[in-house]
Amino acid sequence: MKARVYVTLKGGVLDPQGKAIHHALEGLGFAGVNDVRAGKMIELDLADGTSDADIDAMCSKLLANTVIENYRIEKLG
Amino acid sequence: MKSAVIVFPGSNCDRDMASAIELVSGHKPAMVWHRDTELPEGVDLIALPGGFSYGDYLRSGAMASRSPVMEAVGRAAQRGAYVLAVCNGFQVATESGLLPGALMRNAGIHFVCRDVALTVENTQSAFTNHYTKNERIIVPVAHHDGNYFADDATLDRLEGEGRVAFRYAEAVNGSARNIAGILSENGRVLGMMPHPERAVEAAHGNTDGRRVFEGLVEALMAVA
């Protein structure tokens, strides 16, 4: 089974990479981009039966730094 | 005194750190590999050096902070050992929970590599008691992820408890309240982005970092 973990910066935490991407999009002439926030997606290939609690622990112990980041788990079945 | 410098794959200031400790204390630190699960018996000073441990994969310091040796470092810190965490070491210290907050990408996005002016805010700790309060010192920085972040309640607590050790005298990387270095609750863990070990001898052109080591050595010699 596979799961995807989306790690994003918490609201209010400055995102310099998102700002740089925003700036580059404007440089390419795309108007109307209000804001850009960059995050990351981590795909896990897991043994069948891996518990939700285990996946959640993987996120809170390593994949995300919960001081600055939120995470969302998407199970792909 | 007995000291150890932790070496992670990708550490690159480990030898500078060892050389600074030896220069000031006269004792050669043990170099401890990240896979080790124990520190040498009786170690009372541990240095987490600068560099790019694990290529900064995932987040700076994230992988290193989960290394086997960090459990031993945590235990040593709990029993009151001193920990000097510089640059990548500071990132490892926050990732492992030895110090609060997080170090994020510099607000200006660029890697910053230059001498910066700091003000000494706390002169009560072993790391800082050889400086005078509000003294301005010059220490080099070299980092991409030095933008200190913590929520307002944590920042207020750090300030209220006098745990801000050093502040940038100028904006360098977007750090909250210009924080350059912080202390743990017991004052025995110092995390700082600037590199005091790169300013300890005449050949460095600047010795403003040397007193961090002198204060530590004095505190540790008094115990021994």
Image (spheres, rainbow, N blue to C red):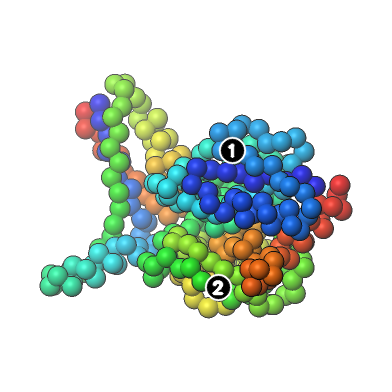
Mark 1 secondary-structure assignment: strand
**In this view of the protein, which residue sits in the foreground, B95 or B53?**
B53
Type of amino acid at the residue the image marks with label 1: Trp
Who's the residue at 86% across and 49% down the image?
A: B223
Residue B116: horizontal and vertical position, in percent? 55, 74
**Residue behind mark 2:** B115
Instruction: Say if residue B41 shows up in the picture.
Output: yes
Describe residue B184's horizontal placement relative to residue A16 as left or right: right
Disc 1 chain ID: B
Who's the residue at 41% across and 61% down the image?
A: B105
Who's the residue at 48% across and 58% down the image?
A: B103
**Residue behind mark 1:** B33
Locate residue A5: give its quadrant. top left
Q: Are marks 2 and 1 in contact (CB under 8 Å)?
A: no
**In this view of the protein, which residue sits in the foreground, B44 or A54?**
B44
Describe residue B11's horizontal placement relative to residue A8 as left or right: right
Of the numbered discs 2 and 1, the one sitting upstream in the chain is 1
* 10 Å crowding of disc 2: few (<14), some (14-19), many (20+): some
Residue B28: horizontal and vertical position, in percent? 73, 47
Instruction: Say if residue B68 shows up in the picture.
Output: no
Residue furthest to the front: B203
Mark 2 secondary-structure assignment: strand
Who's the residue at 33% across and 52% down the image?
A: A8
Disc 2 chain ID: B
Relative height, residue A29 to residue A9 (above, below): below
The CA distance from mark 2 to mark 1 is: 30 Å
Locate residue A14: give its quadrant. bottom left
Locate residue B74: give its quadrant. top right
Residue B145: horizontal and vertical position, in percent? 45, 60
Q: How many marks?
A: 2
* 10 Å crowding of disc 1: few (<14), some (14-19), many (20+): some
What numbered label is drawn on residue A4?
Answer: none
